[in-house]
Image (cartoon, rainbow, N blue to C red):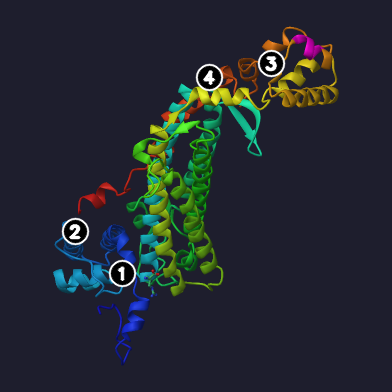
Amino acid sequence: MAQLWGGRFTKETDKLVYNFNASISFDQKFFGQDIDGSIAHVIMLAKQGILTKEEKDSILKGLAGIRRDVEEGRLKITDEYEDIHSFVEANLIERIGNDGKKLHTGRSRNDQVALDMRLYVRLEVLQVDELVKELLCTLLKIMEDNTDTYMPGFTHLQKAQPVTLAHHIGAYFEMFKRDRSRLKDIYHRMNYCPLGAGALAGTTYPLDRNYTASLLGFEGPTLNSMDSVSDRDYVIEFLSALSTVMMHLSRFCEEIIIWNSDEYRFVEIDDAYSTGSSIMPQKKNPDIAELIRGKTGRVYGALTAILTTMKGIPLAYNKDMQEDKELTFDAIDTVKGCLALFEGMVRTMKFNRETMKQSAMKGFTNATDAADYLVAHGVPFRDAHSVIGRLVLYCIDRHCSIEDLSIQELKEISPVFEEDIYDAVSLQTCVEKRLTLGAPGPAVMQEVIGAHREYLSKSWQDENKISIPGQTAEQNKYI
Ligand code: ARG
């Protein structure tokens, strides 16, 4: 049991207590961030004359050695340490002796863990954003290839009006685009450095918090030390954005599962993304789509858990906050895995264009257009609605579509109908004439696709000159 404290204790920690309290099994995930933070802290301490140049160089060399040895498998992170901070500090002291004991000058584990978590989450915000961007590129390609792929649009899962596949996919494009904009907002709001807040009340050492913040690529230091060590808003915001990403993926998965069913056959999921049944040889199941839909609950769970954990915590740091990590890490890994798999599944999915078109031609998806035809010939809309309602009932009795009726039959229902009704209610007309901005008409859809292309040609990460992992040249000198 290697602990950073113990001076005021007269008894060994109970083993069960030690295990219950320890976080090394999961906080080793931000080992790299812990080293990055320590490097920046030490460079700043030396600049301020709190450490000598020799002490700084010796500590930086020691930290670089620990990083290398862990990365190359020579040094194992084990549960004999309480947390990742103790692991690094104990190993540093073992390696370089007394200089290592100065690493923690002017720092507490409270601001240290606040920094590590922030650095970790900040990097993940960028990586999730990249994955969503890759998915958007795949969706745009499907849209470009399918501006004239007709399919029924649904409300209440009942056929409503005809749309195109490009239009349907375009709805998801908007959702994932909003997800990226949320990630960008979160990145900027969270990008302030808590290091230097100490345990809760800052420190009497003359730290240069602006300098530490700039070394770590932050927009600046946080401005209240009590808030700095007890703020996990950015974790909650990120989990909320991730939950929304999952909600979008889940809705899309639900549609793919329906479309992939024998009743619809709109799509066929590639063999590489399907699974079989142990008993029914004919089965090809959409397990990946179902699992993504299922894992949504797990990400919502993380959000709910952390919101609940945080709601009763008085200022400033309390140990409850250690609970922010496992569920957040799990949610991040889950969302990243789902995004990558989902992208592959839709990229390789086959769209059965003819089946979609045939489906759009049934179910009276052109009934609104038939009513609009009457309106164009002077019939008030409410009367037209009622006439077409009767027309649909007539067709249902005869198991046919509006366009299957002869002009005599149509005229019996309304004398306003002329030969041009057939063209007016054809699938092609119904789609091509829908030209309001945001509608499926191919001409207007091309405009939207052009805007999407332009949007994907630039990235907010490039515009803000954000680089992963966000280390500065000054730090890299020592790594
Ligand atoms: N493992 C702790 C956490 O995750 C690190 C901070 C410990 N601070 C303390 N005062 N015990 O929150």
Element carrying mark 3: helix
What segment carries the magenta color?
407-411
User: Which is nearer the N-term, disc 2 or disc 4?
Assistant: 2
For marks 2 and 3, give the CA distance.
76 Å
Give the residue at mark 2. Answer: 64
Give the residue at mark 3. Answer: 403
Q: Position of residue 100 (x, y in %)?
A: 20, 70
Q: Amino acid at mark 3?
A: Glu
Q: Is residue 390 left or right of residue 75?
A: right
Give the residue at mark 4. Answer: 148
Residue at left 29%, top 48%? Answer: 472
Assign the magenta stretch its main secondary structure. helix
Q: Amino acid at mark 2?
A: Ala
Does 318 sit above or below residue 409? below
For marks 4 and 3, give the CA distance.
21 Å
Element carrying mark 4: loop
User: Which is nearer the N-term, disc 3 or disc 1?
Assistant: 1
**Quarter of the image holding residue 19?**
bottom left
For marks 2 and 1, give the CA distance.
20 Å
Element carrying mark 1: helix
* Residue nearest the observer in this picture, 386 or 250: 386
**Quarter of the image holding residue 418?**
top right
Q: Position of residue 314 (x, y in %)?
A: 54, 74
Give the residue at mark 1. Answer: 24
User: Which is nearer the N-term, disc 1 or disc 4?
Assistant: 1
User: Which is nearer the N-term, disc 2 or disc 3?
Assistant: 2
Q: Position of residue 237 (x, y in %)?
A: 51, 54
